[in-house]
Image (cartoon, grey):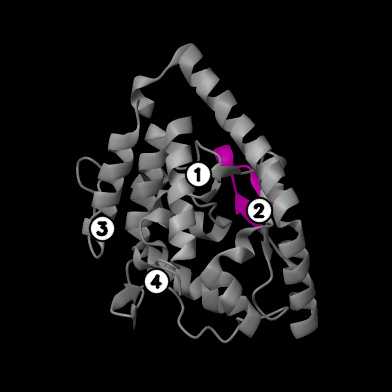
Amino acid sequence: MQPDSQGNPQGRGSGECAAEWDFLSCTSPCEGRLRSGAWARLDRAARRCLDLVAGSVALVLLAPLMLAIAAGIKLTSPGPVFFRQRRMGQNGHLFTFLKFRTMYHDCDQSLHREYVTRLIENRAETHEIGGKSFFKLAHDPRVTTLGRILRITSLDELPQLFNVLKGEMSLVGPRPPIPYEVERYKSWQLRRLLEAKPGITGLWQVCGRATTTFDEQVRLDLRYVENQSLWLDLVIILRTFKAVFTTRGAC
């Protein structure tokens, strides 16, 4: 599957993704390609302020919930509370990515490597749940019972707020890839993808999450990189709440 001339999402689920992007782009008073110089620097500074202020407030408000989740993880399965993994950030810099642990400790990672390879090469199997096709490992034996709940509700992502405050991630941005995923990327998939800080949420998360193909996810991330702005970040954050509360695209 090749991208179209405009980089629009194609393939399964593309209609929904294209419609979502049309809505998001038309709500923005200015697109990234129209901004340069002092305005671009001001916009970057404003988005960093948003990361720091919103990230700090979120950590304070969510601290009781995060402590409860940490206790639940320790009580239900042996191992650390956090899952740490090396991810590739802005300009290819590696950083330690944090999540609440949702899998059994020291489980085999070869299953994920194999699945990622199939996903990138468009050979991944889909799983029908509630009439929708999901591109995700179904009934993954490595995931704990509590872990499944955390994944469906996206609560496992909360520790990434620490990555945001450290400046390694942003609230909104492309998905942070694992180095062995990047090794399998096609040349068009790497185009500009590492120019922006990775985010906790992004365009593909509000466009269906696990219901989008890998190529669609990359195209949506590229669209964000090319059009990123404070306004677009605010719109995506608001629509992320809707996606999380409705568990849209989650499995």
Q: Are marks 2 and 4 in contact (CB under 8 Å)?
A: no
Q: Where is residue 66 in the image (x, y as percent from the top left)?
A: 73, 63
Residues drawn in magenta: 86-97
Location of the N terminus by quadrant is: bottom left
Magenta stretch contains residue 9 = no
Q: Which amino acid does label 3 sit on?
A: Glu
Of marks 3 and 1, the one in the foreground:
3
Q: Mark 3 points at which residue?
A: 16
The relative height of residue 222 versus residue 247 in the rendered view (above or below) is above
Q: Which amino acid does label 1 sit on?
A: Gly
The relative height of residue 73 versus residue 7 in the rendered view (above or below) is below
Q: In this view, does 217 lie to the left or right of 194?
A: left
Disc 3/disc 1 C-alpha distance (Å):
20 Å
Label 3: how many Cα within 10 Å (few below 14, some 14–19, many 20+)? some
Q: Is mark 4 on a helix, strand or loop?
A: helix
Label 2: how many Cα within 10 Å (few below 14, some 14–19, many 20+)? many
Between 141 and 15, which is closer to the camera in this rendering? 15
Q: Is residue 172 left or right of residue 129?
A: right
Of marks 2 and 4, the one in the foreground:
2
Q: Where is residue 100 in the image (x, y as percent from the top left)?
A: 68, 66
Q: Name the residue under label 2.
A: 160
Disc sitting over residue 173 in the figure? 1
Disc 4/disc 1 C-alpha distance (Å):
24 Å
The relative height of residue 119 versus residue 225 in the rendered view (above or below) is below
At a point 73% along the width and 78% down the height, the residue shown is: 105
Disc sitting over residue 118 in the figure? 4
User: Reading the chain from its start, which is encountered first: label 2 or label 4?
Assistant: 4
The relative height of residue 143 versus residue 28 in the rendered view (above or below) is below
- Do we see residue 58 in this rendering? yes
Of marks 4 and 1, the one in the foreground:
1
User: Reading the chain from its start, which is encountered first: label 1 or label 2?
Assistant: 2
Location of the C terminus by quadrant is: bottom left
